Image (spheres, rainbow, N blue to C red):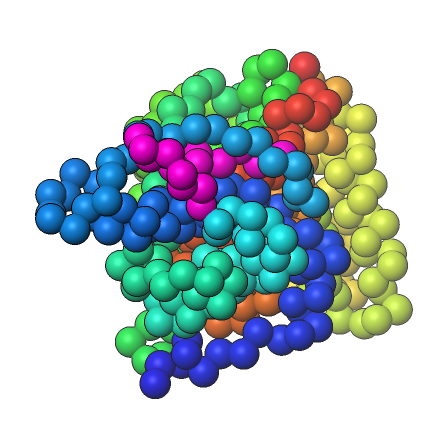
Amino acid sequence: MTHQDNYTFPPDLMNELIDKGFDGLPDLIRIFLNATMKTEREQHLQAKEYERNESRKGYANGYKPKTVKTRLGEITFSVPQVREGGFYPSVLEKGLRSERALTIALAEMYVQGVSTRKVKAITEQLCGIEVSSMQVSRAAMQLDEVLQQWRERPLGETRYLFLDARYEKVRESGQIRDAAVLIASGITPEGERQVLGVSVSLSEHEIHWKSFLQVLKDHGLKGIKLVTSDAHMGLGAARRAVFGSVPWQRCQFHLQQNAGAYVPRQSMRAGVAADIRNIFNAPDRAMAERLLQMAIQKYAVSAPRLSAWLEENIPEGLTMFDFPLEHRRFIRTTNGLERVNREIRRRTKVIGIFPNQASCLRLVSAVLMEISEEWQIGKKYCR
């Protein structure tokens, strides 16, 4: 028995999924029920699509759209038809009546990446018909195709690029390892925020970053005026290799946090934080650089390691002074992606340990696709 078969979905987290809703589930429900209704038609006809056999009891006649209002919003299903009539998939009505249970099952099946054997048992209980492992896998593949098409969609001109990384635990060859999840977002010249892409890999940092950035570029990402990120391992070399001389803004929020490691006494923390804030909030670069030199001298004796760190690192957070004043508050940090990461974390904590990299990519892609769609109808930035 596999680790996945032993998995028990925590009841409290199930309830959280139900109460708070699971963004992206409408598409999952649609794909799942469409595939299951098609299976039910094959069983009714006693023949698969285009199959010739003596026991066939009729012929398929395409699909008819049906839009149903659910607790998750309106969902349009493709209801299978038969030429002779007299057929209507019971799975649709059963599925909708069992929407609450279906939400849990789909969250477990497609987001957890559980074994097809377990999925088969759940679908039989929910829908009252037998579904094969192959058919379940086919439904999962259909979902993956939707998410892959989104990840590989054509990109375009993006003025400001934001990059961040987080880590999720995945099972690889019987071991639990940390997989890097790389995320890119951007602001277009029209002021629209977009999630540009995501990648999940166990590979070396620089190789993963370089591959991810090159994929974005190959999909048409261009016109970048500034890259904002933290000093992630391997990102600097990858960024220079793919985007050449594009300026880099090191995230001021992370810089402020990193400074704490070099403050020798707790009593100094508030003063150091205030000095750094004053530098970042200066009216222009010249003033920021003067305030930086004052801070370097101030701590040269009382905190020499901090003084050296300020001199080496703080200038990387001042690039934003070269850009319009009204844009600076948007490009000085990766806080927008930090909020995205918190939303991803809210979902991934349900899983804990992903069974593989593919299931991790599936969940994160679904969350990011939903967020990106919400952003496109939101307010404009940096216009």
In the image, taking residue 141 as reference, residue 198 lies left or right, namely: right
Residue 86 part of the magenta-drawn span: yes
Is 194 rendered above or below residue 293? above
Is 303 rendered above or below residue 150? below
Place of residue 359 in the rendered image (x, y in percent of width and height, measured from the top left): 41, 59
Can residue 340 be seen? yes
Can residue 212 be seen? no
Residue 364 part of the magenta-drawn span: no
In the image, taking residue 210 as reference, residue 195 lies left or right, namely: right
* Residue furthest out toward the bottom: 1
- Write down the region rendered in magenta: 74-89
Residue 342 in which image quadrant: bottom right
Residue at point 16% right, 38% down? 50
Q: Nearer the viewer, residue 90 or 212?
A: 90
Q: Quadrant of the C terminus?
A: top right
Place of residue 354 in the rendered image (x, y in percent of width and height, measured from the top left): 45, 68
